[in-house]
Image (cartoon, rainbow, N blue to C red):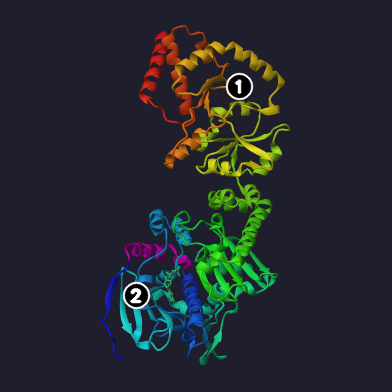
Amino acid sequence: MTIVKTKEKHHFQAEIKQLLRLMVNSLYSNKEIFLRELISNASDALDKLRFEALKQPELLQKDSELKIQITADKSNKTITVSDNGIGMSEQEVTDHLGTIAKSGTQEFLSALTGDKAKDLSLIGQFGVGFYSSFIVADTVTVKTQRAGSSDENAVEWESDGQGEFTVTSIRKSNRGTDVILHLKADEKELLDDFKLRTLIHKYSDHIRFPILMVKRDEKGKETHTYETINKATALWIRPRSEIKEEEYKEFYKHVAHDFEDPLLWTHNKVEGKLEYTTLLYIPKRAPFGLWLRDHKHGLKLYVQRVFILDEVEQFLPFYLRFVRGVVDTNDLPLNISREILQKSKAVETIKSAITKRVLDLLEETAQNDPKTYAEVWKEFGAVLKEGPAEDITNREKIAKLLRFSSTKDDQETPSHALTDYLSRMRFSQKNIYYVSADSFLAARNSPHLEIFRKKEIEVLLLHDRIDEWLIASLQNFDGKSFQSVAQGALDLGSVADKVDTKERAKTEEEFKDLIDRVKKVLSEDVKDVRTTERLTTSPACLVADEQGITSQMERILKAAGQPLPTGKPIFELNPHHVLVKRIKSEVNPSRFEEWIHVLFDQAVLAEGGHLKDPARFVQRINHFLQELAWVK
Ligand code: ADP
């Protein structure tokens, strides 16, 4: 058959060139994984064909036994991975093997450092796929025929992985794809029959389609028959007790297109009103693009073992979008579409069961293996924090999974659960206290904490942007409500000593005049002025009105471009502070004003706020400093 079209040259998308170079360098010590990746792609292609054949059974005609075939050719030094799956049209070949369509590609590439070890783990998170062929091959040829098209309409793709590839029309006598690796000179050992079989067992035993290799006789000579190397059954339908840990791990890499082992998994078969099997995984690392809007996520859906759809979001709430795996059910029709999934009652039921399973898995891990749970929290804590707002039914369950920093140990890494906080609460304490700020240091050093530290009352240190929202959506935990230490009048409830209350009344009386004078000076800036017992070392601080919002929340709203409720803060003075006492006796009205403005601006700064007139603040401070220098 004559070739219909001459060779056409194409350039890889610029990113691919960079990716290829890095991949070959960083993955060299794991070079064997190319086989796993190619077999995984072949298996996906078979799944897709079987799915299309539901509507077009003629696609399966003449070649109905779906299989993957591995051939090693010693004289030509090639390894070929063949499948009789869906194949690719010319357009699909240039699209799929010339560009990377993954979300987060740009972020991925800019995160690469050139440091081998770091890049290796980044590439792992991103996934390697087809391009891993170039770790062992200096040229790769792909011959493919799209299911449903004719033998004359096949395509050949070829590249040396240096930046260009060619596409040629060819004749191919069967449906599907052959990936032919022309091995690099020093990779000949991969041609060894035993070696290949070992690799297939190790990485691809879980593949549910048969992986065939030519059978050899007792003398090791090739025969004309083929034999199946792998188990060739769907892993998730096998009983849990028979599945090895390694098999679970390799299966994960296949479904999630991940390079690393998963962190946790849970495998369950449900029989009852609905019948379904789920195998759910928590990855070790957040994939690239987890925070992008168009990030693809979700589970692989099978109906009665037939692959139906990839990345089905409907089985998971959004805050569990990092969970990967499969769901296989007998209770959905084979011709189900994404649109119908959205309205299905069965899907809703399975979704809530899956949600519960994942939350239970996380809870168990948190209890029995805190070290592993710390890893989960590090990678996915920020996503889980979206949970209480999205999933009211499971609010309490999710709340138990949250981790915070706390004044208990002043550590930046959040490790304290709310239940731990409750167990440490003072006998008569009514609220869960928290302070929130833009950074951990600002939270830890907040003047609002002074009295709490003195009285040894634990306060949660919130320093993640989303934390204020989180607290607002939680409302309370185990009957205790959350109380910002920077909001409202200080109410230590019955934790406060009786003596405190008496003394307070006395001081208030004593400072009444001062407070009135301060109010006049700051009438534009504050809602109220009062003395406070919450400070021990700072002279003053700002607090939000009980009904208002905290200043951290105000900054978040501002950054999000939300309209702000115009609430002025309350200015509180520490009556025991030497500066405050000194100012109290200041008779010169203009000096009094200067002092008050300095204290006010300091209070704004201490909680990470912005001054209206920073230059004026500096002038005032310098003025006082100069006086000090003069005295000396
Ligand atoms: P991934 O598998 O993670 O999507 P790859 O780089 O491995 O990324 O493959 C890119 C795309 O090329 C696949 O998504 C698929 O559409 C196509 N592809 C790869 N191998 C095959 C194959 N054997 N048969 C059909 N299509 C394939």
Residue displayed at 43% across by 78% down: 188
| Residue 261 appears anywhere in the view | no
Residue 308 x %, y %: 53, 73
- Residue 533 is labelled as 1
**In the rendering, at what x and y percent does residue 129 appear?**
45, 69
Element type where label 1 sits in the image: loop
Q: Quadrant of residue 482?
A: top right
Q: Nearer the viewer, residue 189 or 346?
A: 346
Q: Which residue is mark 2?
A: 91
**Which stretch did the figure color magenta?**
13-30
Specify whether residue 18 is painted magenta.
Answer: yes
- Mark 2 vs mark 1, CA separation in Å: 73 Å
Residue 409 lies in the magenta stretch: no
Q: Are marks 2 and 1 in contact (CB under 8 Å)?
A: no
Q: Amino acid at mark 2?
A: Gln
What type of secondary structure mainly makes up the magenta span?
A: helix
Furthest residue to the left? 6
The amino acid at mark 1 is Glu
Rate crowding at label 2 as few (under 14), some (14 to 19) or many (20 or more) other CA atoms within 10 Å: few
> Helix or strand or loop: what does disc 2 sit on?
helix
> Residue at (60%, 45%) from the top-left corner?
403
Q: Is residue 316 left or right of residue 564?
A: right
From the top left corner, tell me how far across and down residue 163 is, in percent: 31, 68
**Figure check: 615 above or below 396:** above
Q: Quadrant of ligand 1?
A: bottom left
Quarter of the rendering occupied by the C terminus: top left
Q: Is residue 557 above or below residue 186?
A: above
Q: Is mark 2 within 8 Å of ligand 1?
A: no
Note whether 305 is above or below 384 in the view shown.
Answer: below
Q: Residue 562 location, x and y as percent?
A: 44, 41
Nearest the eye: 405 or 298: 298
